[in-house]
Image (cartoon, helix red, strand yellow):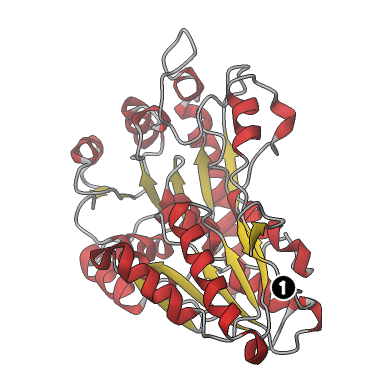
Amino acid sequence: MFSPGADATLALVPDERNPTETSDARLLVIRFSSFGDIIQAAAIPGAFRAEFPRARVDWLVRSDFRTLLEPHPEIERVIAFDRAGGLGGLLRLAWSLGAEPYTHIYDAHANVRSALVGVILRLRRLTLLARLGWPAWAKRPKSRLRRFLFFRLRLRSVLPRPFRGVISFLRPLARWRVSSSPPEPPQFFPSPEGRAEAAATFGGFVPDVILIPSAAWEMKRWPLAHWKRLIELMPTTRFAVLGGPEDAFCAELERVAPERVRNFAGRMTLAASSAALERARLTIAGDTGLLHVADQMGRPCLALIGPTAFGYPTRPTSVTIETPLPCKPCSKDGRGACVNPVYQRCLVDLAPEAVAARARAQLEAEAAKRAPESAP
């Protein structure tokens, strides 16, 4: 019969084997999208295999994101779901996966689609229980009540501050003795095709700093005038600007100093843009997916965090710059209205001079690290 499981999803409840007794663990991660969440969740395979060194890790993902995961050395199989197949195609895929000998299944998405996959997996496994046994299950909680208390009633103690997405993906695996401390970078691995495309697009241009001025929602973008001023304050620095095809405003940054600024917005795929972050000594970005790519690769970056609660990077190589305000954070992901009398004050008050000073310090620190390597 069906009954609510410990993770508050529908669960079939035969006795679950003790996962710590599994010598050859096999994990299925379910996380379909989106770009930034997949990047932050990419630490799961390495963390799991740190506890279960002989483990195999498979990942169920939406087909348009499969190339992000295929180069990952800790993932044996990327299982792609094509949305063109509709709900029926997804359920048939889930039925087939239910016959795989997974010892652990982690719903890292926790939406309606992943819950349906979980039900079908359980039904199929029940028919094969005598042969395969029952897997251990985990689910990343949505924490909707705590988010309501955090944003609406402003009870700030109910969620971690700062909230680091990488750790939030690992924390539910503590039941399997998996550490919530992320494994050493890199935990994101650009594809060879992405690297080749980035090299061809950049040509002979070698940037010191990559700027990522865009974000999905305008409210979490550092003002364009501040980006321009940053370029002016660093007159000997070469900049590359990354963005999507819709980010036409990025052309204005190249016009500030065309002899040392190149605008590549809209000229590369997401895979190539991710690979391009290896080509610079420093990345400066707001709360956006490419920030987490740099973070997961262990590349030095400055994170300009405004109204959002969940965009904080994790690695020691990432430095967060923000303005402390009592109204901050006011948004989960940048949607909604600014609640401060001064629109976007949390980013407007983040002065270009302060960012430039920190960027110069980062570049000098990187140069000092490289100096012993280049010494005869």
Q: Residue furthest front?
A: 1
Q: Residue 274 appears in which quarter of the rendering? A: bottom left
Three-letter code, disc 1 = Pro
Q: Residue 152 appears in which quarter of the rendering? A: top right
| Residue displayed at 41% across by 24% down | 336
- Of residue 230 and residue 123, the one placed in the foreground of this image is 123
Q: Position of residue 163 (x, y in %)?
A: 64, 41
Residue 25 in the figure: left or right of residue 323: right
- Of residue 147 and residue 205, the one placed in the foreground of this image is 147
Q: Position of residue 278 (x, y in %)?
A: 43, 65
Look at mark 1 in the image and give the residue it sits on: 14
Q: Residue 63 appears in which quarter of the rendering? A: bottom left
Q: Residues within 10 Å of mark 1 (few under 14, many from 20)?
A: few
| Residue displayed at 74% across by 30% down | 157
Residue 217 in the figure: left or right of residue 329: left
**239 to 274, vertically: above or below:** above
Q: Position of residue 352 (x, y in %)?
A: 45, 28
| Residue displayed at 64% across by 88% down | 132
Q: Quadrant of the N terminus?
A: bottom right
Mark 1: secondary structure: loop
- Of residue 78 and residue 98, the one placed in the foreground of this image is 98
**347 to 372, vertically: above or below:** above
Total numbered labels placed on residues in the image: 1
Q: Position of residue 376 (x, y in %)?
A: 59, 79
